[in-house]
Image: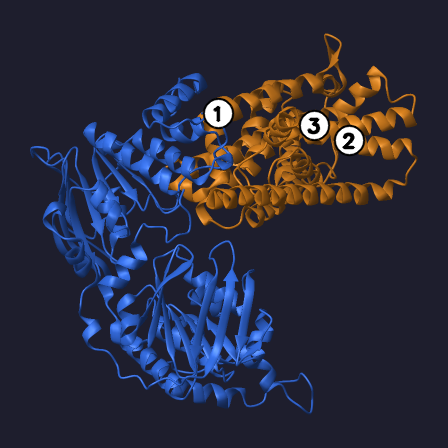
Amino acid sequence: MQPKRLQTIVSRQKWVAIAVATIVLAGVLSVVSPVFLTLSNFQAILVQSSVTAIMAVGMTFIILTAGIDISVGAILFVTSALFAQLMLVTGNYALAFSVTLISATVLGLLNGLLVVRFAVSPLITTLATYSIYRGAAIHLTGAQNIPVPREMGFLGNGRLWGIPVPILVLIVIVIIGVYILNHTRLGVYARAIGNSDRSARETSLPVARITVLVYALSGFMAGVAGLILLARVGGLQSGIGIGIEFTVIAAVILGGTKLTGGSGTIVGSVIGAVFLVLIDNGLNLLNASPYIYDMVRGAVLMAAVAIDRYSAFRQSVVLEARREARIVD
Amino acid sequence: MSVHSNPVVSVRGLSKSFVGKTVVSGVTFDLFAGEALALVGENGAGKSTTKNMLCGLLTPTTGTILVNGQTVPKVIGAEHGISAVHQELSLFGSLSVAENICISDLPGAKMRVDWAAAERIAQEQIAFLGIEIDARALVETLGAGKQQIVEIAKALLHASKVLILDEPTTSLTAVEREKLFVIIDKLKARGLAIVFISHFMEEIYRVCDSFVALRDGCQVGQGRLAEVSQRSLEEMMVGRTLEDARVNLAAPSQTPALEVRGLSSSDFKDINLTVHRGEILGIAGLMGAGRTEIAEAIFGLRAAVGEVRIDGKAVPRDVSAMMASGLCYVTEDRRKNGLFLNRPVRENLSAAHIAGFVQRKLRGFGFRGEKARAHDLVSDMNISVPHIENNVSDLSGGNQQKVMLGRWLATNPEILIFDEPTKGVDIGAKFDIHEKIAALAATGKAIIIVSSDLPELLHITHRMLVMRKGRIVGEFLRSDFDSVKIISLAASSNEGGQDAA
């Protein structure tokens, strides 16, 4: 019975696989490098992964509904630009923070509305808004670098009760995400819609409303992530957020969320984000050329997708065999 | 029999048209608390459309639905206490049993879902149905029978007045089916009105009190089941119109063209059949009996074990080998699997025989004779299209089907397998297609027709095989065709010796 139970846990809690992979990788790295196994290095890794992990929490909801959002990096960029610009002009933190987070949510909401309204593939819809949002930000800033006030550094590099602030923010976001996914209607409906759109409609679930809400939620998360990134970097640079959507989506997929929707966990996505940073960290320790990082990341994602397809195939074979057995007996 | 008070739901002159085509017209009946009504009819008779109007998935074109004597423009399932278990389950596999059952009305405060309460509700529902299922299990891990129970439990949560069951037994074993009937009896005792849709006569007599019979979208009979024999009920469903107007078919030869020996897969078991030159063989059976699967397996589109011989020679079951041996398969779903909708008629006609048109001198540059052949086929098949360069999507269903047929005729096949050759085509095109098929047989081609349209098979085949649950359970010669016998054989719930579970 024991192995069967273990198998059930692994198949139901899909984050277990990535957690094991992360621990193994960490083990290997601690053998390779003596500095790896230190508290400060752990904190550094978590801080490094906080931006993508926060965005991965939002993206998990979208992928659970069988959607995707390519524009999260652009939302991050445009709202960071807005923040930097507002601080430059008004110097009012309350105003800048609230405008940034609200506009991030609104841009996500807009994505959701477009996806629902035009019923075009979310990939194409958000590819279009990606270009629009990023273009708008460059227009807004004139492609210039804008510094943010020094106090902002607290959000990126400061500590509270001895813990780096980005990690605290991540913890709060994860708690909110887990709560929404497991204890609210939004969470259940998001999983249900991704699992079977037809069933969702036959059960008259509010498919359109839920879809819009998950994109808005992801937009909000991108806004939060943008503020932390801005604080860590010290100001707006025109390269901010480019390619981050790849890392975010990869983290979610590595974390065990099915691209076809319906099943996945917040914790898995966060571990996925940490795993990706560990790989960079490992390559760094091995003194690998920075030019191969992207290749390795891509290969890891490819491997994760292949393993996922294989286990889905295995599962369908098992279910089929069970049905066969039922017919025979 | 309960004493009749007022009906809980009444349906008066319900009709539904889709883009000008009427699929249901003038359906009228009453539902009483504690009684089960059987909705009977052949495939395509309008049962599903009627069901969908009753549970609110479709809005009737005309007619009224009265709930407790009051007219409602459109049923809102949850509001009016009517809910349905659809033939195709509307469950979420990656969600738990409790989540599935409670999903449209989750307990708890505005923001927070009370999972303990949801599990309790789900467990109560399941316990009432008398089956043991863990409310925390994921639905995808359950077998078909238990999934069906979960679906019923889910529907029951909102069915305070009427529960509609659409073919609820197709995926169940004999034991599970009996359990389901006990549950239905319980629900009737609880005061629910049941609408039961099934092809299986035994089940209908076991479960129901009254019936409404539909044919071609029209109501052809209604009454108490106690007052009508199974045979007359079946006669109502089948009708007798087309049966009398059979075409004259030329006598087939005795030379076997296609022989299938011991063909088996997960969808059908041990299929043996032979078609002779000049013969039209029909394969009848209900939806899900495995007819299409057999046709696809013979043509090599589907994995199976067994032997296929053409003109006495074994041929590997592989599409290109089959085509080379002169076999062709005209699919049931022409829009999805057959036609290239947004390509011209010309290309669709030449698609199966493209190698025959390739230029010899300048290899691969352009096609020779393709247009001329397309023109020939258009006039030969009587396809009405303004020009061969028009897209196939511009054509009517009947003309699209003729294009499909023409494409395969371009390959000069010796054996043709038609899957639902006249599905969704108008009467005129149906006549043309039937005539063409009869003419092909007269020139010595061997033909198999798979169809759920029984009158069509009676009309145009020399011989008919009847399938039930993946097995051939009967064979009829044209001289012995009897629609009532055929339908009761196809729909018997006796498992045909398949298992004695």
Query: Which shade is chain B?
Result: blue
Q: Position of residue A98 (x, y in %)?
A: 56, 23
**Mark 1 and mark 3 residues within 8 Å of each other at the beta carbon:** no
Report the residue marked by disc 1. B136
Which numbered tag is attached to residue A271?
3
Report the residue marked by disc 2. A277
- What amino acid does circle 2 point to? Val
Q: Which chain is orange?
A: A
What is the chain letter for disc 1? B
* Residue found 19% across the figure and 42% down from its top: B208
**Nearest the eye: A139 or A251:** A251
Q: Position of residue B408 (x, y in %)?
A: 48, 79
Q: Is residue B407 visible?
A: no
- Helix, strand or loop at label 2? It is helix
- Helix, strand or loop at label 1? It is loop
Which dot, 1 or 3, sits closer to the camera?
Answer: 1
**Mark 2 and mark 1 residues within 8 Å of each other at the beta carbon:** no
Which dot, 2 or 3, sits closer to the camera?
Answer: 3
